[in-house]
Amino acid sequence: MKKTSKNRRNFIIQSSMAAGALSLGSSFILACNGKNKPSESNEGKAPAAKKDSLGIALVGLGNYATYQLAPALQKTENCHLAGIVTGTPSKEQVWMSKYDIPKENVYNYENYDEIANNDDIDIIYVVLPNFMHAEYTIRAAKAGKHVICEKPMAISVEECEQMIAACKENNVHLSIGYRLHFDPYNLKVSELGQNEVYGKVKKITGAHSFKLNDPHAWRAKQDLAGGGPLMDIGIYVLQGAIYTMGENPIEVSAKYGEVTRPDIFKDVEQSIDFTLKFPGGATAEATTSYYDTANFLRGEAEKGWWELKPAYAYSGIEGETSEEKLTYPPVNQQTLQMDDFAKCVMNNKKSKVPGEMGLRDMKIITSIYESADKKETVKINW
Ligand code: NAD
């Protein structure tokens, strides 16, 4: 039933919490320890744009682009919705009217590369099914446009490397749609964990699951999604574990769950459990599935604990620690994320959620699948 590892993978935060979270600096951002720092950076190379607000074109007008990103772009200060790329002609007029987009800023998948000649568009945001991320990011880079690419970054480590290389070659910035790096609750978790507020972290647990009932969904197809819930939503638990610890895991063991819907889960996993081991001995136990409903991230340290539940939602995240209930004013994660990237482009600064972070996660995901396929613990070499 399962594919083998071989064929599988081809803040503007509120001032009430700003001080603690921002003091985490780059350790939250990349969650790389000294050895694991990205070797490639386009920092200092891309030409800084000289506009007050950068134009973004959304590529792929599905659920996330329609119901989250476009509304979030109505609240941004450093960027705005300037164009669209869609393969569905009926969406063109709807989006043009709703968001006042001129006809010349509307593209399809065939004439996409002509966006190179459009000065209204500075940033391309790839919101397509996972298997299209690499191609549309690389084409955007070749068109000289900065790129935000949705998670998971691509469907293989090799693709992630090609995307980073293309952006570097073309002197454009690349960022991944890791919106929770702009959420105050998740930032607080990283502060509690990385600053050892309750002592050393000993154990992290987390789950992210929803019920996928559509047998035709691209998310259930290996060639389109690159994997099952791990690629789609388990990645948030993986991220949560890493930004709690501020370092990369060195070992993983994983196990596929039972397939109770063989009509849907023919070639991607229905569920998977994985345990990450960190250099100091801390562990993270995670579950992700397409047949259940779950959404939490918990940390246990020597002298206290914390938990977010839900942890990964667009809004309505709730949190508490062994000492207090956490309460932050609501934010629009995507507005903050896109404004931050636009500022990075303007100031020629590396994004705090760069391509290298997407690559890092893809390496770990690959190791998780390898462990589940081989039924053995896999060391992750950085
Ligand atoms: P979706 O299915 O709602 O939309 C996908 C879009 O791609 C549709 O407009 C569809 O027409 C278009 N498309 C083009 N070629 C396609 C093809 N061959 N097969 C299927 N669709 C094709 O998906 P979505 O939920 O909007 O997800 C899109 C991307 O955004 C995914 O990579 C997903 O992981 C990511 N996402 C991120 C978040 C987040 O919180 N960061 C949330 C949801 C989705």
Image: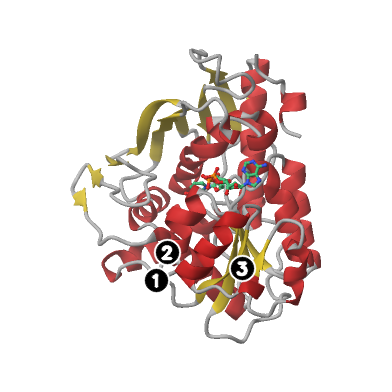
Q: Secondary structure at mark 2?
A: helix
Instruction: Give amino acid for label 3.
Output: Lys
User: Which residue is labeled 1 in the image?
Assistant: 75
**CA–CA distance between discs 2 and 1?**
6 Å
Where is residue 350 shown, x and y percent of the image? 61, 68
Q: Residues within 10 Å of mark 1 (few under 14, many from 20)?
A: some
Residue 39 in view (yes/no): no
Instruction: Give amino acid for label 1.
Output: Lys
Residue 181 located left or right of residue 224: left
Q: Which residue is more in the foreground, 158 or 338?
A: 338
User: Which residue is labeled 2 in the image?
Assistant: 72
Mark carried by residue 199: none
Where is residue 127 shown, x and y percent of the image? 58, 53
Where is residue 78 shown, x and y percent of the image? 49, 77
Residue 264 located left or right of residue 374: left
Residue at image point 39% right, 45% down: 312
- Depth check, mark 3 against mark 2: the one in front is 2
Chain-order first, disc 3 or disc 2: 2
User: Which residue is labeled 3 in the image?
Assistant: 350
Q: Secondary structure at mark 1?
A: loop
Q: Which quadrant: the C terminus?
A: top right
Find out whether the residues at labels 2 and 1 contact each other: C-beta distance under 8 Å.
Answer: yes
Residue 202 in view (yes/no): yes
Q: Which quadrant: the N terminus?
A: top right
Residue 85 quadrant: bottom right
Residue at image point 39% right, 69% down: 12
**CA–CA distance between discs 3 and 2?**
22 Å
